[in-house]
Image: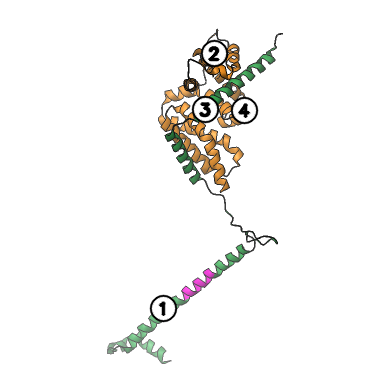
């Protein structure tokens, strides 16, 4: 059936990234799998009849809500606050030059990125660790914009915030990642 | 040549996008190398979700070729509905008929048993029985 295949293809296309995003948030693979399954079921039960073009932002919103529900169930207020804090400043290091770092990281070629000191897996692991350290809203905005490739408006809808907030979260996330990776000598 | 603030902001935004996309590429590489047990759990979850999806209303349509011969839901649906209603009415009628026949048979058996039985003399003191005899005589 075409409808079922379309939904299956969509879920297959997003499930791995959804799992990784959930892992970045909850840091528990079993919990992340449960969250992704809940999100898939909710999308299928409640929104399968919507046009397929609406599924990506809907699924991201459902996934974010499922993640929040998981935190609520855990009742770990400290963890919740830590993961979803938005109160961090963009920088507390006066000597750190964003532009210089961004140019250095974004301008590197692929051959330069094949670092002798780190295997690709190690680099990936460090990138994932840096992403895991981001405040929750910044991480969500970054992953939705650059990984899920939603536009600013779709990201804002998925996150339930303004487009301006999305831009701010994304910018801060990229700067924080650049700073963290530079400190570790990582070139993505 | 110095750049004005808006040019600087645009350059920063472009660099942010490039770095963001590059990091996302690396994350995608990692996501494609998930352990087998994780991919199996995801496949199972996908199956569960699909089984919960409400199915869209199906229409069985068989189209003939050429002159628009179609069994696709135009004329036969009301005919089928009428046939169903007629079958239901016939069923009710048959059940009612059989039920009344059974009641008549049962009453006749009781009357026959009463009439063929030995009649006790005190029965003639029963006004109801006397009335029954008068009615029967009529």
How many marks are shown on the rendered structure? 4
Do tags 3 and 4 sit on the same chain?
no
Residue at horizontal 48%, vertical 35%?
A36
**Residue B113 at least partly seen:** yes
Looking at the picture, how far across and down is residue B41, in whole percent?
44, 37
Q: Are marks 1 and 2 in contact (CB under 8 Å)?
A: no
Q: Which residue is mark 3?
A: B29
The magenta segment is B87-96
Give the foreground label among 3 and 1: 3
Give the SS element for disc 3. helix
B137 relative position to A18: left or right: left
Residue at horizontal 50%, vertical 74%?
B93
Q: Which chain is orange?
A: A
Q: Toward which corner of the image does residue A156 lie, by quadrant? A: top right
B125 relative position to A135: left or right: left
**Residue A62 at least partly seen:** no
Give residue A152's mark.
4
Give the foreground label among 4 and 1: 4
Report, in whole angstroms, how far the alpha carbon at label 4 lies from the one at label 1. 78 Å
Give the SS element for disc 1. helix
Give the foreground label among 3 and 2: 3
Report, in whole angstroms, how far the alpha carbon at label 2 lies from the one at label 4. 23 Å
Residue that extends furthest to the top in the rendered view of this protein: A95
Q: Which residue is mark 2?
A: A91
Q: Chain of mark 1?
A: B
Mark 2 nearby-residue class (10 Å; few <14, some 14–19, many ≥20): some
């Amino acid at each position: 059936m075409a409808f079922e295949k379309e939904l299956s293809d969509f879920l297959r296309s997003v499930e791995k990234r959804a799992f990784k995003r959930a892992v970045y948030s909850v840091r528990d693979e079993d919990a992340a799998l449960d969250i992704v399954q809940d999100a898939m079921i909710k999308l299928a039960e409640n929104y399968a009849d919507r046009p397929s073009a609406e599924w990506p932002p809907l699924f991201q919103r459902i996934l974010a809500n499922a993640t929040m529900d998981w935190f609520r169930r855990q009742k770990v207020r400290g963890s919740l606050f830590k993961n979803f804090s938005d109160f961090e400043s963009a920088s507390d290091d006066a000597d750190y030059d964003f532009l210089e770092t961004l140019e250095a990281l974004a301008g590197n070629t692929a051959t330069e990125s094949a670092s002798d000191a780190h295997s690709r897996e190690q680099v990936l692991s460090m990138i994932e660790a840096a992403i895991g350290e981001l405040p929750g809203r910044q991480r969500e905005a970054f992953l939705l914009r650059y990984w899920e490739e939603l536009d600013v408006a779709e990201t804002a809808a998925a996150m339930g915030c303004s487009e301006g907030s999305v831009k701010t979260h994304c910018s801060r996330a990229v700067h924080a990642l650049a700073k963290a990776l530079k400190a570790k000598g990582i070139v993505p | 040549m110095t750049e004005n603030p808006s040019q600087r902001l645009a350059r920063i935004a472009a660099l942010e996008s490039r770095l963001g996309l590059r990091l996302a590429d690396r994350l995608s590489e990692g996501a494609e190398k998930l352990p087998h047990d994780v991919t199996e759990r995801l496949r199972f979850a996908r199956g569960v979700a699909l089984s919960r999806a409400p199915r869209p209303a199906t229409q069985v349509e068989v189209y003939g070729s050429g002159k628009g011969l179609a069994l696709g839901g135009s004329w036969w649906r009301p005919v089928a509905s009428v046939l169903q209603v007629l079958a239901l009415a016939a069923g009710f009628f048959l059940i009612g008929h059989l039920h009344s026949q059974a009641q008549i048979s049962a009453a006749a058996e009781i009357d026959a048993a009463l009439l063929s039985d030995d009649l006790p003399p005190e029965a003639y003191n029963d006004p109801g029985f006397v009335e029954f005899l008068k009615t029967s005589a009529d």
